[in-house]
Image: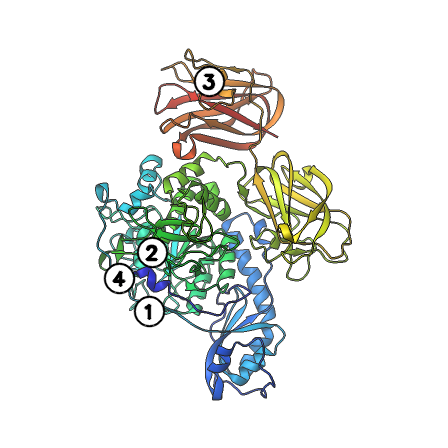
Amino acid sequence: MSRSMRLLRALVTATVATAVVFSSNAAHAGGPANTLAAAEPTPSPKIPAAVRNSVADGGVATFWVRLARRADLGTVAGKQTRAGRATEVIRVRKEAAESSQRQVIATLRAAQADFTSFWISNTVKVTGDGALLKRLAALPEVAKIEADVPIVIPEPIVAPRAQATVAGIEWNIGKIGADRVWSEFSDRGQGIVVANIDTGVQWDHPALTGQYRGNSGGGVNHNYAWFNPVGGCPTAAPCDTDGHGTHTMGTMAGDDGGTNKIGVAPGVKWIAAKGCEGTNCSAAALLAAGQWMLAPTDLAGQNPRPDLAPDVVNNSWGSLGYSEWYADVLASWVQAGIFPAFAIGNDGPACGTAGYPGGLVHAYSSAAFDVNDVIAPFSSRGDGASYIKPDIAAPGVNVRSSVPGGYASHSGTSMASPHTAATVALIWAAVPSLRGNVDATREILNVTAVPKSDTSCASAGTANEVWGRGKLDAYAAVARARSGVIAPGTELPVVMGYNRTLPGTDGHWGFSSVDDDPATYWEVPAFVNSVSINYAFDGGRRTTDKVVVQLPAGEPARTLTMSVQAAYEGTVDNVTVSPAQTYSFNPATGNKVTITFPPVHGCCLSLSFPNGPWSPTIKIAEVQAFSAAGKNAALGRPVQGSAQPGYGTANTVDGNTATYWESVNNAFPQSLTVDLGATCRIYQVEMTLPPSWGARTQTLSIEGSTDGVTYRPIAGSRAYAFTPASGNAVAVGFNMAAVRYVRLVFTANTAWPAGQLSELRVLAS
């Protein structure tokens, strides 16, 4: 088996209905656990048989106590920085854990039991006997007891080296176009920090030492760059007791400056956590590592720094069989702006073999394909559930990368996931405004993947349970991100807006309606007579013309009256875009309704329910918003500028991408000016070239005027890359500008000595 097969066999922890937790308090040592209570007449339903059996006949075992209370992350979205969001995630999770674990901890201390409390999803790891187990299960704040089962890491099979491409660039790097990202966009992931939770990393490997964040070039400091909750290293420095972690890190960041160009994003910095003791990965170590990623600490585990959290975490491990035990870790990372990349597992080719946590909706999981674009037989498949898994496919067969002391080729979805993780680093380095915007980045990866149809597991077409959305294309993803163009109909990431404190019932707050989980919901208290819920677009203002409102699957058929408002700034300029209407929800059609309205551009949307109280009360499971093309104020309007014969300015506003304008040659600067007919509020300029043209970069600025005489800057001069991978389209967004005339001033073109455009769209609200 491959190295991915070692880490991806299975963390067979019991399925949990409430996600996981990070470790907070140190373990409390004591004497043997007390026998504190008489036997119950019937076993508690909170205790599974496996745990009861482990403490039978006076035995002592380790098990997990999961608390019922969930943390409310609704305040996180309001924080303006990644560090601020991470700090808020930590605060609210700790607050929920500390308040709800008091009686459990008091019981454990009274019993002098060994325990460790965790706060990410409110759990406590306990070593105790049957009497203590029953006493804990009897506490009302305890939701369930779970077994403690580690991951077993099978031995890998070392594959023969695959052929490298030109200049030592490995086949897998060229396959996804990462080398083109380096050469054409000068983007190697600079400024982005990647991490892995794995078996460790050989920090001084020639392909990795220069990218290690703990190596400043003038000295080495492992604080905030390395976390080892399991030991096994000869010193405090990072080590790899297995080789798997060094291999996955090499695929993300590796480059020795010579012929070993093994990493997708060799300009990044990396940090790491050793979540695997050796051939096993304990749940406690993986949780502790997950927590550390939110706020790395010094080597003593003290002085946490959320500002030093990584941007991306690769996780080439998982378990067979559905389980939510790590779900709260994923939710915390996403809320803090950390991208969660996972392998999907190595239990294919059967369907329904997706590993977890990679199979959870918050994870972004990768399947594996080979040099011939054939899906690997071992790559796990989904089962046709309510969402597609895996999400994408990446190279994962005979992938050459670093291992302690040298290089080796390994196979597995463990090898595929680092390609995806590092592509995120390339995207965020290219477009810093996307950094931390996990939802928008997932969408970029999805829409630029090369589709591969497959009918073998429940679904087919552009997205299926074998390939996900298709083959990873790093070049297309970066090009799309740089273009700024969001295709109409794309789901837009939304979060709770300004009224995050609106009424809800315990455990059913507003943020549950935008958490991508239809099993959770926002519930309006029965005493409320009218209510509005506000959502903000995550990542900036967007153009939308549609929202979809979904009730929980178990909600009976009913009608609800609601209206939709939109705002550009926020609370001060809300306008109604869809007046109050009565909508019918029916479980037979998924309990969904779609509300459409004219395209509107802004920061926020609100749903208003004016006619309570309701019986039954309102429960909203999910609210989705979708992008619109926007109103093109330039279509068919008069345009002025110099032009080559046969390539006039009117071609830029005729709605036909096959016709184009070309300015007088060899005479930069050249301008193109469109008269919108009246002063209006514009927010974006979109420019395209004929889709069949080759790549080129044009340098231009955008100006606006109300009278056609005095112009002011809207967007300063910049080089814009037009690439076939992005449809030869570029979008330039900006704050609302009230103008009648829009002028583009061209000063350079790498492919022709003139300004060129096939279409100019000026979006107005």
Callout in the foreground (2, 1): 2
Q: Residues within 10 Å of mark 3 (few under 14, many from 20)?
A: some
Q: Height in image: 285 above or below 497?
A: below
Where does residue 8 sit, x and y in percent of width and height?
Answer: 37, 62
Q: Amino acid at mark 1?
A: Thr
520 shown above or below 448: below
> How far across and down, in percent of the image, does residue 442 sit?
47, 47
Whole-Å distance between the Cαs marked 2 and 3?
Answer: 56 Å
The reply to whether discs 4 and 3 touch (Cβ–Cβ < 8 Å) is no
**Between disc 3 and disc 1, whose residue precedes?**
1
In this view, the residue in front, 499 or 54, is: 54
Which of the 4 quarters of the picture holds residue 237? bottom left
Q: Which residue is mark 2?
A: 377
Instruction: Please give the name of the residue rendered at 63% of the width and 74% of the height, measured from the top-left corner.
Output: 140
Residue 349 in sight here: yes
User: How many neighbours does mark 2 have within 10 angstroms: few (below 14), some (14-19), or many (20 or more)?
Assistant: some
Within the image, what quadrant is residue 407 found in? bottom left
The kind of residue tagged 3 is: Ser
Tag 4 residue: 157
Q: Distance of mark 1 from mark 4, alpha carbons?
A: 15 Å
- Residue 542 drawn at (x, y percent): 56, 38
Q: Earlier in the sequence, mark 1 or mark 4?
A: 4
Label 4 – label 3 distance at C-alpha: 61 Å
Q: Which residue is mark 1?
A: 279
